[in-house]
Image (cartoon, rainbow, N blue to C red):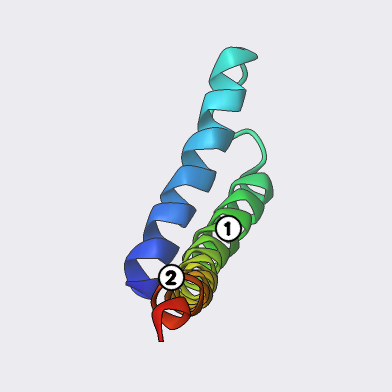
Amino acid sequence: MPLSATVVGAVLGLSVQLHSNALRKLPLMRHPWEHVLAIGIGAVFGNQLVKWEAKVEEDLDKLLEKAKAANERRYIGSDE
């Protein structure tokens, strides 16, 4: 998954830079270093997005476990 996130992020960064140049009616490869920078930023963004998604899922699981435990204490524990 991280490799595909890196590739998707890099392609996204490149496409943003190409689209920006196309909208301004500039040559698409006007400053090649900007494209390299956009690819790098896009790759980092893709990787961070995957890490953030995993952390959110982990935090959600913890919150659901806490809520389940609280509900069990509240409703099931009161009958005893």
Residue in the image at 65% along x and 14% along y: 24
Task: Tell me if residue 53 comes above or below residue 55 in the rendering.
Answer: above
Residue beneath label 1, please? 45
Residue 16 in the image: state x and y as whole percent: 54, 35
- For this orientation, the residue located farthest to the bottom is 80
| Helix, strand or loop status at disc 1 | helix
Residue closer to the observer: 20 or 63: 63
Residue closer to the observer: 4 or 68: 68
Q: Quadrant of residue 65?
A: bottom left
Task: Tell me if residue 73 comes above or below residue 40 in the rendering.
Answer: below
The answer to whether residue 28 shows anywhere in this view is yes
Residue in the image at 53% along x and 70% along y: 63
User: Is mark 1 in CB contact (under 8 Å) with mark 2?
Assistant: no
Residue 54 in the image: state x and y as whole percent: 46, 71
Would you say 76 lies left or right of 45 here?
Answer: left
Q: Amino acid at mark 2?
A: Tyr
Question: Mark 1: few, some, or many residues within 10 Å (few <14, many ≥20)?
Answer: some
Q: Say which mark, if any, is on residue 75.
A: 2
Residue in the image at 56% along x and 66% along y: 52
Give the alpha-carbon distance from disc 1 to disc 2, as whole Å. 44 Å
**Quadrant location of the N terminus in the rendered image:** bottom left
Residue 69 in the image: state x and y as whole percent: 47, 79
